Image: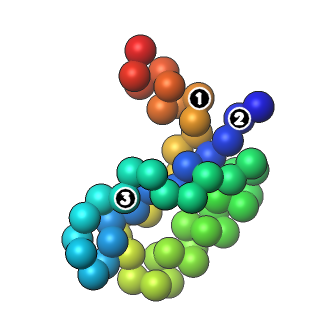
């Protein structure tokens, strides 16, 4: 099963959050992405767990 990880740069600390929330569907992840952007966080991305695993190999 594929899952989707939301990564972002925290607007207060300016640190990259690589272990953000994980969602079962891309739609849920995209909603979280929009929510984080509205809160002012930067560089919000949605990554597939499969894509992340391929990058590690």
Tell me: 50 left or right of 20. right
Tell me: 53 left or right of 4. left
Quick one: label 3, few (<14), some, or many (20+) residues within 10 Å? few
* Quadrant of the frame with the C terminus: top left
Report x, y in % for residue 7: 44, 56
Report x, y in % for residue 25: 75, 50
* Quadrant of the frame with the N terminus: top right
Instruction: Identify the residue under disc 1.
Output: 50
Tell me: 34 left or right of 43. right
- Is 28 situated above or below 36? above
Disc 3 from disc 1: Cα separation: 19 Å
Quick one: label 2, few (<14), some, or many (20+) residues within 10 Å? few
Report x, y in % for residue 51: 52, 30
- Residue 17 - label: 3
Could you say which quadrant of the image residue 42 lies in? bottom left
Of callouts 3 and 1, the N-terminal one: 3
Q: Give the number of the mark in front: 2 or 3.
A: 3
Q: How is the image coloured?
A: rainbow
Could you say which quadrant of the image residue 12 lies in? bottom left
Of callouts 2 and 3, the N-terminal one: 2
Instruction: Identify the residue under disc 2.
Output: 2
Q: Give the number of the mark in front: 3 or 1.
A: 3
Residue at image point 74% right, 48% down: 24
Q: Residue lying farthest bottom?
A: 39
Q: Secondary structure at mark 3?
A: strand
């Amino acid at each position: 099963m594929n899952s989707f990880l939301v990564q972002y740069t925290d607007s207060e600390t300016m640190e990259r959050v690589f272990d953000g929330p994980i969602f079962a569907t891309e739609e849920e992840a995209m909603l979280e992405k929009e929510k984080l952007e509205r809160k002012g966080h930067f560089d919000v991305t949605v990554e597939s767990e499969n894509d992340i695993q391929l990058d590690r190999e």
